[in-house]
């Protein structure tokens, strides 16, 4: 008979004072394979990535905030470096609150670039040198957008090629 005692050692994630925290802000209505790919590729660059749903009361969403957060939790539950959250108001204020020095954004096209360039320059000024890190989309995801996915869902089509498998059963409206 084995009389060895099982000793359970609790593990804690301790964030260093100088840890690199990035916020990946978006509507994620819903999250797509394009979003997921950006987060996965950014993991080696940061100690923590906060995938944060920006709440804009003027905007109409297909999925409720609660459901979008549930979907994000389902997708990122196996990535300890990733935290899911939401925020209201200016992204720069949220970054300060979270101690994040970096914003993460994806670029699909020259249209994305022109828009993101202006926002990034503004955020750099009003966000005390907040830096935006851009990752260019993989070619196979460059045509995927939440807008297209929403339209297909509304039309009763199959979006399983565009969203992570964890969401396949969560996209009914
Ligand atoms: P927003 O409402 O801020 O545009 P989105 O949820 O649409 O939020 O997008 C969040 C971020 O993800 C943006 O930086 C956007 O450019 C990026 N993104 C969206 N779709 C893709 C994709 N297919 N490939 C790479 N990046 C993407």
Image (cartoon, rainbow, N blue to C red):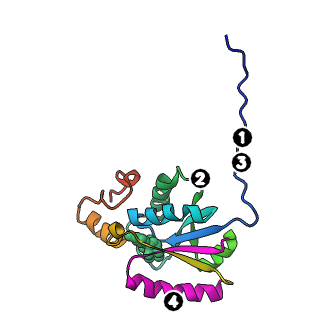
Mark 3 — residue? 12
Vertical comparison of 44 with 125: above or below: above
- Mark sitting earlier along the chain (2/1): 1
The CB of the residue at mark 1 lies under 8 Å from ligand 1: no
The reply to whether dot 2 and dot 1 touch (C-beta < 8 Å) is no
Magenta-drawn segment: 100-127
**Residue at 48% in and 64% down:** 65
The reply to whether dot 1 and dot 3 touch (C-beta < 8 Å) is yes
**Quadrant location, the C terminus:** bottom left
* CA separation in Å, label 3 and label 4: 39 Å
**Residue at 72% in and 15% down:** 3
* CA separation in Å, label 1 and label 3: 7 Å
The reply to whether dot 4 and dot 2 touch (C-beta < 8 Å) is no
- Mark sitting earlier along the chain (4/1): 1
Mark 2 — residue? 80
Magenta segment's dominant SS is helix
* CA separation in Å, label 4 and label 2: 32 Å
Q: Secondary structure at mark 4?
A: helix
Closer to us: 163 or 137:
137
Closer to us: 102 or 126:
102
Q: Residues within 10 Å of mark 2 (few under 14, many from 20)?
A: few
* CA separation in Å, label 2 and label 1: 15 Å
Closer to us: 153 or 115:
115
Mark 4 — residue? 118
Tell me residue 25's x, y (percent).
53, 72
Tell me residue 138's x, y (percent).
39, 68
Q: Which mark is residue 10?
A: 1
- Mark sitting earlier along the chain (4/2): 2
Q: Residues within 10 Å of mark 4 (few under 14, many from 20)?
A: few
The reply to whether dot 3 and dot 2 touch (C-beta < 8 Å) is no
């Amino acid at each position: 008979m084995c009389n060895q005692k099982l000793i359970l050692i609790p593990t804690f994630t301790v964030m260093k004072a100088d840890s690199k925290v990035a916020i990946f802000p978006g509507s994620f209505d819903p999250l797509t394979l394009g979003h997921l790919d950006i987060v996965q590729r950014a993991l080696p660059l940061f100690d923590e990535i906060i995938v944060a749903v920006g709440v804009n009361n003027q905007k109409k969403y297909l999925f409720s905030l609660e459901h979008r957060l549930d979907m994000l939790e389902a997708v990122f539950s196996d990535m300890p470096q990733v935290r899911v959250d939401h925020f209201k108001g200016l992204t720069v204020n949220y970054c300060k609150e979270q101690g994040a020095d970096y914003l993460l954004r994806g670029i699909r096209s020259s249209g994305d670039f022109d828009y993101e360039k202006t926002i990034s320059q503004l955020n750099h000024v009003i966000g005390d040198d907040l830096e935006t890190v851009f990752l260019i989309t993989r070619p196979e995801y460059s045509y995927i957008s939440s807008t297209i996915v929403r339209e297909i869902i509304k039309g009763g089509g199959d979006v399983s090629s565009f969203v992570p498998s964890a969401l396949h059963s969560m996209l009914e409206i």
